[in-house]
Image: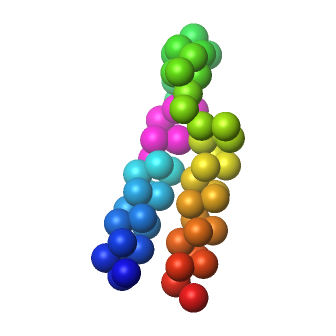
């Protein structure tokens, strides 16, 4: 289980970096990404949900 939690934490960190890169894009580039966006929530919300899940798993 610890290995999975570590991998999830790495995924969260990568997603945080991707979120920063997303914000650095122009509006046109962001709109292109959003066309096929695969989540029902914003990217920041997905990261926050992942963080909450990781905290729950660590209990």
Residue found at the very far bottom of the displayed protein: 59
Whether residue 30 is visible to the viewer of this picture, yes or no, is no
Q: Quadrant of the C terminus?
A: bottom right
Give the x, y percent position of residue 39: 60, 37
Please provide the residue range marked out in magenta: 17-23
What residue do we see at 68% from left, 41% from top? Answer: 41
Residue visible at 53% across and 41% down in the picture: 19
Residue 20 is covered by the magenta coloring? yes
Q: Is residue 5 above or below residue 15?
A: below
Instruction: State whether residue 7 is above or below residue 39.
Output: below
Q: Is residue 28 part of the magenta span, yes or no?
A: no
Near-viewer residue (53 or 13) = 53
Q: Does 20 sit left or right of 27 as displayed? A: left
Q: Position of residue 17 (x, y in %)?
A: 45, 47
Magenta span: chief secondary structure: helix
From the viewer's side, name the closer residue of 9 and 24.
9
Q: How many marks?
A: 0
In this picture, is 40 found above or below 45? above
Percent position of residue 48, x then y:
63, 57
The structure's colour scheme is: rainbow
Tell me the residue at 53%/79% (across/down): 57
**Where is residue 6, by image quadrant?**
bottom left
Tell me what residue is drawn at x 47 percent, y 35 percent.
21
Q: Position of residue 4 (x, y in %)?
A: 36, 72
Res. 1 in view: yes
Q: If the image is split into quadrants, where does the N terminus sit?
A: bottom left
Please identify the residue farthest to the left as the structure is shown.
Answer: 3
User: Quick check: 36 above or below 13?
Assistant: above
Is residue 38 or residue 22 the one in the foreground? 38
């Amino acid at each position: 289980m610890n290995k999975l939690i570590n991998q999830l934490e790495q995924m969260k960190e990568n997603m945080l970096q991707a979120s920063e890169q997303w914000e650095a894009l122009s509006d046109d580039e962001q709109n292109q990404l959003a066309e096929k966006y695969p989540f029902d929530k914003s990217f920041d919300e997905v990261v926050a949900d992942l963080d909450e899940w990781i905290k729950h798993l660590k209990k």
